[in-house]
Amino acid sequence: MRTILITEGKTKVESPNPEDFKTGAGDYAPSLTKVFYNPNMELCRDISISVAQVTAQMFNRLYICDPLAGIGIRGLRYANEVKGVARCVVNDKSMDAFELIKRNAELNGLSNSVEASLADANIILLQNRGKFNFVDLDPFGSPAPFLDAACSSLSRRGMLALTATDTAPLSGTYPKTCLRRYGAKPLKTEYCHEIGIRILIGFAQRIGGLHEIALTPVLVHATRHYFRIYLQGQRGAQRADELLKEMGYISHCNACMRRKISYGLITELPEHCECGRKYSHAGPLWTGKLADKRFIQEVIADLSERNFGLKHQEISLLCRCAEEADGPPTFYDLNRLAGFLKKPTPKMGELISAIRSNGYFASRTHFSNTGFRTDAPIEEILKIIENA
Ligand code: SAH
C-alpha cells in the first residue's frame, strides 16, 4: 500500500494515497484500499470535532471510543483537536489499520491520551462497559451490528454518534433490507432521507431502551451518501419510556401529498386519506425533534473559531439544521407542488414568508434545496402557491 502524509484539521496522518482509489469527478472508492480512508468525509469529521468540543464542555472530560477507526483519523483528531479529552481508544480489527493507527498516534505526539487497539469493535466496547461518554460508530455500511455494545459502553450520560452509509435501504430503495436490519418500513417520497434518518434514530432508541438509556437526537444531517446522527444518552428507564411516546408512523398520500403522524409504537394507522385514496405508511420511526437548536448554535460557534478549509459549507449546513430544528416531521418539495398545480415555481423565500405570516412554522430544510418544512395544512400551502 502506497501511503502519503496528509493533514486534516490540525492533525497529520499517514494515509493510503487518495490518487490510488480515485474514481473521477472528485469521488473515491476507499473500500478498495487495504486501510479505509475517505477524503470526502472531512466535512463530517470537522463537524464531529466541534460536537465533541461542545460535549466536552458539558461533561468536563471526554472518554472517547472510535471502535471502527480505519487509519484512526477520527479518534486521533478528537485527541488532538478537542480540549478535555482524557482518553481515546482508537480501534480496528485490521492489522494494517492498527499499525497505521499506532504510527499516526506517534506522529502527532498523542501516545499519552490515545490507546491504539486491535480487536473486534463489539469486544472492545463490551470490555469497557460504562466507560465512555463519547462513542463514535463510523462504519462502512450499517452501524446496527455495533449499537448494542456501544450502548453498554456508554456511561450515565454520554454522546453516541452514528454514521450510516446504507442509505439505499433506509430511504426505501431496498425496503426488505430495511425491515430486516432496522425492523421498520421505509417509504420512497420526496422526504425519504428524513424517513431513513428517523428510522435509524428509532432503531437506536429501541436498542438504547434495552439498556435503559434514553437517546435524544441533538443534531442529524444527511450529506452525500451518508446519514450522520448525534444522540445524547441519559440512563434511566423512565426517560427511555418517555421517548417511546414519540415513536410512531408517518402515513403519506401519494395522490394529494397529505401526511399524517400516528404516535406510539403500537397504534392504529389510518387506512384512507381525506381525499379518499389509500395511505402508504413508514415506520416505526422517531417522530420527535431531529435537533436541539441551542446545541447546534454552540457547535456553530465552536466551528467558527477553528481554521478549517470547508468551514463555509459546514456552517451553512448547520445553519439550515438549526433553522428547521423546531419544525414538524416531513417537508414538501416546492417544484412538485408547483407542478401539481401547473403553476410556475414561486421563490422559496417568498413562500416561506407567506406561510409564516399566516401564523405557521416554515423553514428551509438541509435535506433538499427545493424542500421546505411547515406545519401548515396542505390546502393552505396550495392556496398560497396558487395566489403567488
Ligand atoms: N471511521 C473511519 C472509517 C472506517 S471504515 C474514518 O473516519 O475514516 C470501517 C472500518 O471498520 C474499516 O477500517 C474496517 O477494517 C473496520 N471494521 C469493520 N468491521 C469491524 C469490526 N467488527 N470490528 C472492528 N473493526 C471493524
Image (spheres, helix red, strand yellow):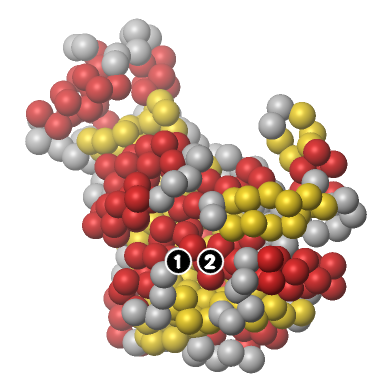
At mark 1, the secondary structure is loop
Q: Is residue 155 above or below residue 222?
A: below
Q: Are marks 2 and 1 in contact (CB under 8 Å)?
A: yes
Q: Is residue 179 shown to the viewer in this render?
A: no
| Viewer can see residue 221 | yes
Circle count: 2
Residue matched to label 2: 80
Say which of 271 and 240 sits in front: 240
Q: Which residue shows up at 34% across the image and 40% down it? A: 320
Q: Residues within 10 Å of mark 1 (few under 14, many from 20)?
A: some
Give the percent coordinates (x, y) of residue 144.
Answer: 62, 68
Left or right placement of residue 240 versus residue 106 in this view: left
Left or right: residue 88 compared with residue 39: left
User: Where does residue 18 sit, x and y in percent of width and height?
Assistant: 77, 43
Name the residue beneath numbered marker 1: 82
Q: Is ligand 1 less than 8 Å from the beta carbon at label 1? A: no
